[in-house]
Image (tube, rainbow, N blue to C red):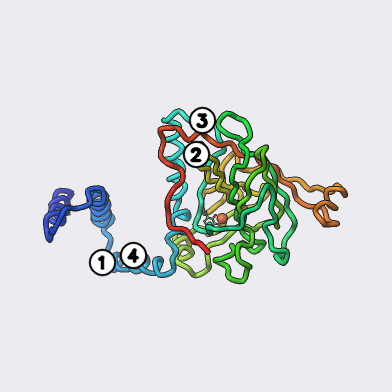
Amino acid sequence: MDKKAIDALLDRFETTGVVGPANPRIQTIFRRLMGDLMLAIEELDISSEEFWQGLNFFAEAGRNNEFGLIAPGVGLEHFLDLRMDEAEARAGLKGGTPRTIEGPLYVAGAPVCQGEARLDDGKTPGDLIAMSGVVHGADGKPVPHAQVEVWHADSRGNYSYFDTTQSPFNLRRTIIADAQGRYKFRSIMPLGYSAPAGGSTDKLLKMLGRHGTRPAHIHFFVTAPGHRKLTTQINIENDPHLWDDFAFGTREGLIPPIKLNSDPVAMAAMGTDQPFQELSFDFHLNAAEVRAPETDIARLRAAA
Ligand code: MBD
Ligand code: FE
C-alpha cells in the first residue's frame, strides 16, 4: 500500500460516521500518528501476528499501569526535557539548574517541614546522609521560603506508597526553605530503582537487550512565586549506573560531590557515632515571565 492509498483511507476515517464537530487538535494528532503507524506497518512489513502481539503488549502495559515507566524507559520523558531546554533557549533563558525527568513515582501531599526535615521514619535501614543548600532566584539572590519537594527510594531501590511495606510518605517531604533560602534534610542513602521484574517495561527492555536500572538519585520539585517550577534530580556520584541510566535522567551539573563527614561534633549533632555522607547542592530558578511553555506540568499523579 502506498502513501496515497493510506491518505485516502485516513480521509474516509474523518468523513465516516460523523455526528458532530471534531476536536481539531486531537483530529490532527490522531491522523498523523495513525498515518505514521500504517506507513511503518507497510514499510517494515509487520505481520498480522506481530500487530496483535503489539496490541496485547500495550493492553497488558495498561493493566499493569506501566506506561508511566515505559515513557522514561524508552527515552520519551528525556526527549520532552530536551524540547523544553530548546524552547527555553529560544526564549532567551539561560542558566538555572538543569531539569531532568520527574518519573512516575511522585506522591502529592507529603508532610510539610520548615527549613529542615528528616525524610526517613527511623526504621528504614540504610546509611545516614545529610543534604543542604540554598535556593537562588533569577536575580541570583536567595529566595526566602522557596518550596523544596524531595522524594527518593530506600536502600533496596523502592519508593514508599508504591512499596506498601514502607510507612506512608517515608523518604518524602515538602521543605519550606528559611528566610535565607536555605533547606536541609537528613535521610538514608538510596539505591537505584529497577523496573519490576516480569513487568511490561522489563519485558520490553529485555527484547531490546537493555537493563531497567537507574543510578541512585534524589528527586526535587523546587517552586517559588515569580519563578518557573524546576523538576530535577541529583545523582549519587560513583554509582556504577551513573552514566548508564535506563531512564536517561543523569545530566552534567546534577552530580554534586559527596563526602564522608567524620567530625565528632557533626556526628554528635546528627545523633550518630558513625561518619555520615554529606552533600551540598544549590538550586537556581528561572524567572516566570518568559515566553516558554509552562514547566508546572499537569499530569495524573498519585496522592495519598
Ligand atoms: C524512577 O525512580 C525514576 O526516577 C524514573 C524516572 C523512572 C522510574 C523510576
Ligand atoms: Fe526515581
At x 66%, y 39%, the residue is 179
N-term-proximal mark, 1 vs 3: 1
Q: CA distance from mark 3 to mark 4?
A: 42 Å
Dot 4 corresponds to which residue? 54
Q: Is residue 241 visible?
A: no
Q: Give x and y (percent) for residue 264.
A: 88, 49
Whether label 2 lies within 8 Å of ligand 1 gets the answer: no
Q: Which mark is residue 48?
A: 1
N-term-proximal mark, 2 vs 3: 3
Dot 1 and dot 3 residues touching (CB under 8 Å): no
Dot 2 corresponds to which residue? 228
Residue 255 vs 192, above or below: the answer is: above
Task: Give left or right: position of 67 versus 168.
Answer: left
Task: Give left or right: position of 295 versus 98.
Answer: left
Q: CA distance from mark 1 to mark 2?
A: 47 Å
Between 166 and 157, the one lying in front of the other is 166
N-term-proximal mark, 3 vs 4: 4
Q: Amino acid at mark 2?
A: Arg
Q: Give x and y (percent) for residue 188.
A: 70, 57
Q: What secondary structure is marked by label 3?
A: loop
N-term-proximal mark, 4 vs 2: 4
Q: Give x and y (percent) for residue 158.
A: 60, 63
Between 81 and 93, the one lying in front of the other is 93
Quadrant assignment for the N terminus: bottom left
Q: What secondary structure is marked by label 4?
A: helix
Residue 144 vs 70, above or below: the answer is: above
Q: What secondary structure is marked by label 1?
A: helix
Whether label 1 lies within 8 Å of ligand 1 gets the answer: no
Q: Amino acid at mark 1?
A: Ser
Q: Residue furthest right?
A: 264
Dot 3 corresponds to which residue? 94
Q: CA distance from mark 2 to mark 3?
A: 13 Å
